[in-house]
Image: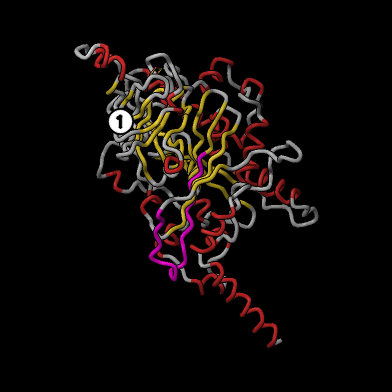
Amino acid sequence: MLKPEQNRALMEVGPGTLMGELLRRYWLPFGAVGELDKQATRPVRLLGEDLVVYKDLSGNLGLVDRHCPHRRADLSYGWVEECGLRCNYHGWKFDHTGACVHQPFEEVAHPDARFKERITIKSYPVQAHAGLLWAYLGPPPAPLVPNWDPFTWGNGFVQIVMTEIPCNWFQCQENSIDPVHFEWLHDSWGMRLRGQLDGPTPPAHLRIRFNEFDYGFQYQRVREGQSEEDELWTVGRVCLWPNCLFTGNHFEWRVPVDDTTTLSVGWFFDRVPEEMEPFRQERIPWWYGPLTDTKTGRWLDSHVMNQDFVAWVGQGTQADRTQEHLGESDRGVILMRRRMLEEAEVVRQGGEPKAVIRDPAANKRVELPIIDRDFFLAGYSITDVVEGRARGPRYARNFVFQAGQPEEITREYRAAMGMDRVEQLELAARSTNGTSQ
Ligand code: FES
Ligand SMILES: [Fe+2]
């Protein structure tokens, strides 16, 4: 059980707070690159700061204060030019470094004055990588945007899915180091939601363990029917430091918008069959997933991450950890809380916390523990799928993680995965089997 001040310390993300300063040492994904093709500016709220991201006509990305330093108009309603973003109120213009580069009437009235040189707008580094927009809100020099192993794979269909969740980020991240919830929140509850009441009960967890490594924690488990030779025990899944879950071919970041809101950012990779290679995406598709059922007003619960969202928001807008009763299943949560506070203390004392990447050689490809990594590198054929050698999560027929995938993205996915061909061959195989019986 935590004291109220410890609970608060884990949740506050604003400038100058303990965890807020820790989080400001890392690049945070906050959107999809493709969003700025539709609309060149959009508001961003990140770590309690109101900002605007834009892409100007030269392709420069900028991330600046939401409010114009003249008289505070909302720059998300401004427009982009060859270089920079212009305020729609009196036309002051700013570049991505935060310099004020034009003050139309001031320059007419006082051609010799150098007023604009005294004006700057708050600006932060922003980068596009792996189809995501990343921001760094910490002190210079900014580290490198992590080049996680799956970002380098190729020949995969990638999609980005985002949803704003009305609760604090830390309870979402605690879910990234909570193996036992799979058995209950996803397996047992999932069965009930599907009306499968008399099937076998899901395999129980028998052993769990947690192991810290350079970029986070591995959590490992043995469930009924599995052994300690299984990769779920020898490798496990990754609670990626500081705010992500990584399961081998997808990332789920829990990005703090402010103390009471979290942006869930999912990045999903599906390897295409070798007949569809070489496969390259012109643009990485992205979508915002809905949170509630419009008919009932209740949270959606049909998909894996929607079930997680139900658990997170159910803990309250800010989980009250002074009222908890932690048990053996929570050893990972306890470990993560302790390590977060320790690393935040490192920052408070002027040091560099763990998992900040500054070495370009190391960042060529940052490897993480991945179950069956060879599958993603070696690939598989359509015949493997039809004959049952690439099933389930390796060749997913539907998007199981979040509700609401737009139809055009479903179509793009099916085309990339050669699914019409797979289904034709499966049908042919079934009718051949049928006639031979
Ligand atoms: S408020 Fe932006 S130019 Fe006046
Ligand atoms: Fe989950």
The residue located at (30%, 35%) in the rendering is 82
How many numbered dots are placed on residues in this image?
A: 1
Task: Give the x, y percent position of residue 179.
Answer: 58, 43
Using the rendered view, name the quadrant where residue 91 is placed.
top left
Question: Taking the image as four quarters, which one is ligand 2 found in?
Answer: top right
Which of the pair 4/432 is nearer the observer? 432
Task: Give the x, y percent position of residue 437.
Answer: 71, 86
Q: Is mark 1 within 8 Å of ligand 1?
A: no
Task: Give the x, y percent position of residue 145.
Answer: 34, 39
Residue 342 visible from this viewpoint = no
Q: Residues within 10 Å of mark 1 (few under 14, many from 20)?
A: some
Q: Which quarter of the image is occupied by the N terminus? A: top right
**Residue at mark 1:** 142
Judged from this view, the residue extending furthest toward the right is 198
Residue 179 visible from this viewpoint = yes
Task: Give the x, y percent position of residue 102.
Answer: 28, 22
Q: Is residue 274 magenta?
A: yes
From the viewer's perspective, is 411 left or right of 341?
Answer: right
Which of the pair 323/422 is nearer the observer? 422
What secondary structure is marked by label 1?
loop
Q: Is residue 419 above or below residue 122?
A: below
The residue located at (73%, 36%) in the rendering is 297
Q: Name the amino acid type tagged 1.
A: Ala
Q: Is residue 232 magenta?
A: no
Which span is picked out in magenta? 265-282
From the viewer's perspective, is 37 left or right of 105?
Answer: right
Judged from this view, the residue extending furthest toward the left is 112
Q: Is residue 235 above or below residue 51?
A: below
The residue located at (76%, 57%) in the rendering is 199
